[in-house]
Amino acid sequence: MVEIQLLFADDGNRNALASVVEEHHTAITDLEFRQCDMYVVDEAVFPTYRDDIEARKHSQEPVFCPVVLVRRDRTPITVTLPDPATRDPPHLVNAVVEAPIQKQTLFRTFTNLLSRRDQSEALTEELRERNERLEQFASTLRHELRNPLNILDGYLDQATERSDDHFFEICRDATDQMMQLLEDTLLLIDGGEVSTDPRPLDLSAVSDGCWNVVTADGADIEIRTSKQILADEVRLKQLLENLFRNAVEHAGPDVTVTVGDVEGGFYVEDDGTGIPTEERNRVFDEGYSVASAGTGLGLAVVQAVVDGHEWEVSLTDSTSGGARFEITGVRPYPAAQ
C-alpha cells in the first residue's frame, strides 16, 4: 500500500488528516522524515523539511515522488510551484490544497499524483529491462563474433596463399554465422515483437529449404508432414532454421532431425541427448545455450516467432530421448469448415 508521510507540527491536524488518508492509504505520522511514496506538508513546517524533501525527490529519480503543500487561508506561498505551460525542471511542490482540507479534493489530488507516480515507475522498469536486454545482446555479440572473426582472419590468409576453395568455404561459413547472429539480434533488440504476414505454405517444402541452409556433414533430416499451414514465410524459416541449428549444435553433427505433425501444429525433434528437465524453463531465455557453439539467441528467436503468430511452443523428450519442440495453435490451410 502507498505510504504517505504527513508533516504537520500540530498533533491534532496531523492525526485528523491521518484518519482520512488511512481510508485508502497508509499514513505515516512520525515527525522524523521517512522514505515514503508521497508527502503532505503543512506550509508552516515546509522550510524544516525542504532539504530532506529535495534529497528524497532526487534519490527517487526518474520515479516521480509527489509532494502536496497544505496552505492556510490567505497565507502567501513561499515556494515555487510548477507551471504546466512550461517545461521547467521539476519543482519540490507538485500540488497545493487549501485548509480546511476537503476530503474529495484531497483524494482527487492523490489519485492524479499517484497515477503519475505509477506511470513513472512503469516507464523506469521498462527502461531498466530494455537496458538489461541491450547489455545482454552486447555481451553476446562481443563473445559470439570473436570466433567467426578469428576464423576469417586465419583462413583468408591461407585461402589467398594457396588458392584453395576449401578455405574460402570455411570463411563463407563464418560469414554466414555472423549474419545469422546479427539477424537474430535485430529480431530481439526491440523486445522480440514480431510482425507477421501469414500466407499458405507447404511445411514440408519450407522445412527442406531450411535444412539445406543449416545442413552439416553427417546430419540427416526426416520430413514426415504434408501439411499446408498459414504462416509468415520469413518468420517460419527463422523458426525452423534456429531449431535445426540448435539440434546440430547440441546433439552433434551426425544428428537426425525429424519434422512431423501433432494435433494443431507440428514438431521438430532430434535424436541427441535432450535438454535436462531442470533447464527447460529457461531454454527460451536470451543468452541460454546448451552448447559452446551456440549463440544463446536461437531459441529466444523461436519464442519470438511463436508469439508473433500467437502460437504456443513446448519442449519435451523425443522418442529417442532427444529434444522435441512442439508448435501448436497453427492454423491449417485450408481452414477446417
Image (cartoon, helix red, strand yellow):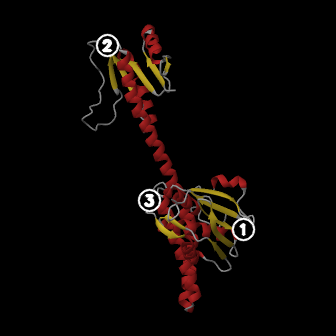
**Amino acid under disc 2:** Arg
Q: Residue furthest front?
A: 337
Q: Secondary structure at mark 2?
A: loop
**Amino acid under disc 1:** Gly
Q: Are marks 2 and 1 in contact (CB under 8 Å)?
A: no
Which residue corresponds to mark 2?
72
Task: Using the image, tell me which numbered label, if any, was put on residue 195.
Answer: 3
Q: Residues within 10 Å of mark 1 (few under 14, many from 20)?
A: many
Which residue shows up at 36% across the image and 18% down it?
Answer: 104
Residue 209 sits above or below residue 14 on the image? below
Q: Secondary structure at mark 3?
A: loop
**Amino acid under disc 3:** Ser
When asked about the image quadrant of residue 102, the answer is top left
Residue 260 sits above or below residue 160 on the image? above
Task: Using the image, tell me which numbered label, if any, was put on residue 64.
Answer: none
When asked about the image quadrant of residue 118, the answer is top left
Residue placed most toward the observer, 321 or 150 = 321
| Left or right relative to 251: residue 8 | left
Residue 174 visible in the current orientation? yes
Per the model, the C-alpha gap separating discs 2 and 1 is 77 Å
Total numbered labels placed on residues in the image: 3
Q: Residues within 10 Å of mark 3 (few under 14, many from 20)?
A: few
| Left or right relative to 207: residue 219 | right
Which residue corresponds to mark 1?
272
